[in-house]
Amino acid sequence: MKTDNTKNVLLIAQKAKEASRRLALLSAIDKNNALIKMARTLIDNQDLIIRENEKDIIAAKKQNYPKALIERLVLNEKRIKEMSNCLLDTAKIKDPIGKVLAAYKRPNGLVIKKISVPIGVIGIIYESRPNVASDCIGLCLKSGNSVILKGGKEAFYSNKAIFKILQDCLNKTKVPSDCVQMISSDNRKELNHLLKLSQYVDLIVPRGGEGLIKFVAENSLIPVVKHYKGVCHTYVSDKANIKMAEKICYNAKVQRPGVCNAMETLLVHKNIAKKFLPNMIKCFQAAKVELRGSALAMKLIEGIDKKATEADWYAEYLDLILAVKVVNNTDEAINHINKYGSNHSDTIVTKDKKEAQKFLDQVDSACVYWNASTRFTDGYEFGFGAEVGISTDKIHVRGPMGLEGLTTYKYEIYGKGQIRQ
Amino acid sequence: MKTDNTKNVLLIAQKAKEASRRLALLSAIDKNNALIKMARTLIDNQDLIIRENEKDIIAAKKQNYPKALIERLVLNEKRIKEMSNCLLDTAKIKDPIGKVLAAYKRPNGLVIKKISVPIGVIGIIYESRPNVASDCIGLCLKSGNSVILKGGKEAFYSNKAIFKILQDCLNKTKVPSDCVQMISSDNRKELNHLLKLSQYVDLIVPRGGEGLIKFVAENSLIPVVKHYKGVCHTYVSDKANIKMAEKICYNAKVQRPGVCNAMETLLVHKNIAKKFLPNMIKCFQAAKVELRGSALAMKLIEGIDKKATEADWYAEYLDLILAVKVVNNTDEAINHINKYGSNHSDTIVTKDKKEAQKFLDQVDSACVYWNASTRFTDGYEFGFGAEVGISTDKIHVRGPMGLEGLTTYKYEIYGKGQIRQ
């Protein structure tokens, strides 16, 4: 599989940069036509994609990869249809480029316009799910950016097939085919080289496990928008509607435990713990959720499986495991979240508006909820369309990263010969 | 001068983070009152500041620092008055925090609000000019951020005096004095340690020479907004008003050659070169500007001092030196700027609207001008008030970085018990 070397990586980055300048000037119609054509091409080539995907599945099984990972790797007709639909949906979104974000006249007569423009070249570093390739190609092209993909070795054949089909398709459109590039090596040498090419690549978005993201963050000279972990909390206040709290907690933990916006820690006010927790625990037990409790929770309530350690408060289980802590007041809940959380998504269940606003103001996370499940942190649920990822950073983009997160701006200044005094 | 060690740096960062949570909740009035009090304190203590500054000046002279650097170091009554006024101006700007940037209701009834919030803790790494300390403290506090300052050793006593006076002053206000921190070591060990503390510091802004900025960019695990160089261009089209072009070029080069938005390279269309350049060169010669020309410029025109080398096209002279290139058309000018420029500020002089728009669209710089001097790229000139710096990056903030660049946002989501289906 070793087909790339660092010289190739440089060439790929240079071609992507050069093509990005032409892509940036295309009309929304030209970009959308390309997206629609790409969506069709995926369906037309689904047999080929599934065949190549099977090679990855066989290799993964041979290497005894975890079942969940293999499940994420699989491409079938349904999933290819979803990939195709994602491209069609992206075509339908309003073009994010050329928007006048601000326009004003200065006392000296200069007219200053702030205009949304593409960033340039985006590097997407991802693991497993091969649909990321087509989703991200679509989002980057729509926002006028070239994209360099670097997938994981476990999806080598699938990634390569999707990439080749979509890049070929671009030859029949006005989008330069060099706008889409892939590094298909199986080691981190080429990745490390890519991360140094700040002259050609403008932004890196890593999507994957903590190890990959740490590697990217520590080695990149290019700005990185990342998402480390989703350690999401639900705080059930003593002023909560208990029925609502049960529904929200169950949804946040059980509906899809393997995703980043699922609840990992439940915080409960001590005055409501005895009323709320016993039935809640029964529901969790029925769903086979393992519970790990704080000392106070263990003391007050029966049915908690084991005592939580300090590590549990930091843990992103991505599984049917839940840490439960009984707190003395809202301040303790907020401080716990700001200390142990990952600045992702947290929610309070309460009937008290003032308490809710305090929580919304003071919890330092991208998405803070009042009386709703944390599971809504998602580009589609926010109305952005598909997302490149969810940023737990505070710089450039925070929370769901849709098309707007793939744009920057420039100032266009219109004068009549003005000079500085 | 070695008073800090890495343990102290950690402590400083932790205190700044902790205080930032309290600062983020203060009202605009509380923050503005603190700024006004700080402005007064600077004036009240100007004798002390000038005395401490003299120690730096004496040390700089002993070490034979360049005259220009010593000039930048000097603090006198006039400059302290300017520092004080900058704080007062900052107090007058509209509070950038708590703005509703977007608000909408989803089909499931969830109300999503995007609200501007402080970033948290900002590290400002700077060299020479000690006024940066008070300007940046003011901008960070106004935007609800804690600030950690790390000045250069050449302004050790000045920085320390300004910092101490302003931090003490905060004890008489509602702003926690821990919001303002300084690392006053004379080496890069502590800086390097600070750059790793991504748990506590949210953004690093380096201000200084290329060496410092390169060091910060290469060693930081914290996001960096930076400004490498200002290699700014003026392109005089064959459709330019020659009188206007002369005025703009002279202003962009001569009015203040030592700043980042001064012109470093002049591009001239070949069809206007013989009409425009001879008189322009005379003006530059009168101002003692050294001219370095492209082969074609040397061939067409007399009076250019010497031939430009490849290195000249990349050069940020910050001095009375100008590279001059004659180009065949607008495309060549645009390509030259995108290849050799620094994505800072570039201008076209032309009467042709279509040509101007092409230049505005295709030049990949933070600020692109039509018929105006590049010297206007500046927070005050843009109407932002004081600036933290000018970003040549594309991520988070581009061009003059005022208060808005010191904010991020969070999503507040208001539900009525919604769960994800």
Image (tube, coloured by chain):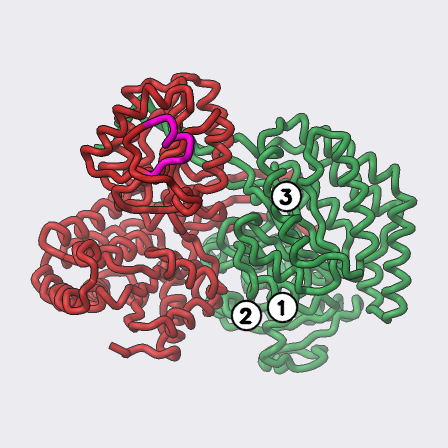
Chain colours: A green, B red
Marks 1 and 3 sit apart, C-alpha to C-alpha, by 43 Å
Q: Are marks 3 and 2 in contact (CB under 8 Å)?
A: no
Give the amino acid type for the residue marked by disc 3 in the picture.
Ala
Relative to B187, say whether B74 is above or below: above
- Residue drawn at x 31%, y 19% as measured from the top left: B242
Whether residue B298 appears in magenta in the rendering, the answer is yes
Q: Quadrant of residue A258?
A: bottom right
Residue beneath disc 3: A16
Label 1, label 2: how far apart the Cα atoms are: 10 Å
Residue receiving disc 2: A340
Q: Label 1, on which residue? A: A265
Packing grade of label 2 (10 A; few <14, some 14-19, many >=20) is some
Local SS, label 3: helix
Query: Sequence order check: which comes first, mark 1 or mark 3?
Result: 3
Residue B31 x, y percent position in the rendering: 28, 53
Badge 1 vs badge 3, beta-carbon distance below 8 Å: no
Highlighted magenta segment, given as a residue range: B292-301
How many numbered marks does the figure carry? Answer: 3
